[in-house]
Image: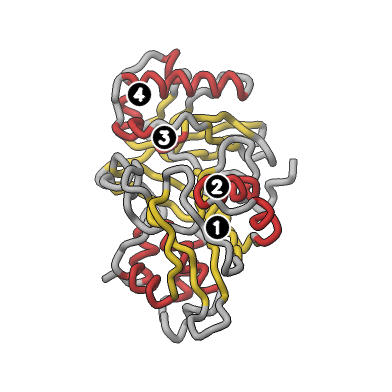
Amino acid sequence: MKSNLDLVNDTDGFPYGDGPITVDGQGLFTLLWRDAGGDYPIGYVLDRVVDEFAKLPASLTGNMQVDRSVRTLRMFHDLADEPSRTAAVAALTAHLRAADTFPLLRGWRDEAWPVHGRRGGELLFSMERAAVGLFGAVRYGVHLTAYVAAGDDAGLRVWVPRRAATKSTFPGMLDNTVAGGLTTGEDPFECAVREADEEASLPEAVVRGGARLVGVLTYVYVTDGPNNGEAGFVYPEVEWAYDLQLPPDVVPRPKDGEVDEFYLCDVPTIKRDLAAGKYKTNCAVVMLDFFIRHGLLTAEEEPQLAEIQRRMRRELPFPGPHWSNWSCA
């Protein structure tokens, strides 16, 4: 059985501390970007990925420069604009996919995800969703928890979906009511509205009128392999969390094939299934955050509550819209 802290460890699995870091025996290079203010990091790249990049011509790797003494690299740094960089990254990742260099890319989605710079609103380039792990750049998503606050003895209940058995990641596991990744240029709330329709058939008017932004979760996930295609890749992640109280007559229903079934679960059932490891890793953390905010998980019950809360909002070293000054130029 998993403790609540175990569930957080499964999601925020990247080592803490300074100095050289290894993940599953692999070292890491820091991917740097440069602007008028100097160098800053935008991702973590595994040794074995750098080694594969090094086998390719400079025209594909964006004139990659590697400094092994300080374990940094630069790519696409001499391309002047975002469209040029996006096209160059697309050429590299398409080549790697065609060569089947990384099993990670077998989950290709044809979805463009953003990689941000540190100036407010700055988009450095977009890249295929399945390839973001090669660069260890930040991934962005939304999670919406739909619940029913019953007036009887049943208490609060949450709509919990079971992921389709055909999903390429975490098949058959339990999830948050609605979740999805942000494509380039997409607003988090609009993403939640879109995903609520696509995954759960929730009426747009209900979501727009009732969904509330309740926080932003940040952590650094390390892939385990069986659930996500290939082990050892680093994913700094930012998740906008929304709550949506539904009336009893609004029932989520599968629509796009990503969910097999929805269950209306009481709190004891959810806690049991969390402890049994039945939830997708980051969805377990979102559910714990929901419980804490609603007073369903307290320090009296969970002596490690402060550590759990700290780990749910890890400081990420990379820029993006999760930064408090992101709206500043």
Residue 27 point in image, percent of width and height: 31, 41
Q: Mark 2 points at which residue?
A: 195
Q: Mark 4 points at which residue?
A: 97
The quadrant of the image that shows the C terminus is top right
Q: Which residue is the extreme one toward the right?
A: 329
Instruction: Give the vertical position of 14 relative to 276 (above or below).
Output: above
User: What is the image's colouring?
Assistant: secondary structure
Residue 306 point in image, percent of width and height: 48, 74
Q: Earlier in the sequence, mark 2 or mark 1?
A: 1
The residues bearing labels 4 and 2 have C-alpha atoms spaced at a distance of 27 Å
Q: What element carries label 2?
A: helix
The quadrant of the image that shows the N terminus is bottom left
- Tag 1: Cα neighbours inside 10 Å, few (<14), some, or many (≥20)? many
Which is in the foreground here, disc 4 or disc 1? 1
Instruction: Give the vertical position of 68 relative to 247 (above or below).
Output: above
- Tag 3: Cα neighbours inside 10 Å, few (<14), some, or many (≥20)? some
- Residue at x-position 42% and y-position 84%: 301
Instruction: Give the vertical position of 64 relative to 35 (above or below).
Output: above
Q: Are marks 2 and 1 in contact (CB under 8 Å)?
A: yes
Q: Which of marks 3 and 4 is nearer the N terminus?
A: 4
Q: Which amino acid does label 1 sit on?
A: Leu
Q: Are marks 1 and 3 in contact (CB under 8 Å)?
A: no
Q: Do the residues labelled 3 and 4 touch (CB within 8 Å)?
A: no
Q: Mark 1 points at which residue?
A: 144
Does 308 sit left or right of 53 as displayed? Answer: right
The residues bearing labels 3 and 4 have C-alpha atoms spaced at a distance of 10 Å
Q: Is mark 4 on a helix, strand or loop?
A: helix
- Residue at x-position 35% and y-position 22%: 96
Q: Which of marks 4 and 1 is nearer the N terminus?
A: 4
Q: Mark 3 points at which residue?
A: 130
Q: Can residue 15 be seen in this view?
A: no
- Residue at x-position 31% and y-position 44%: 232
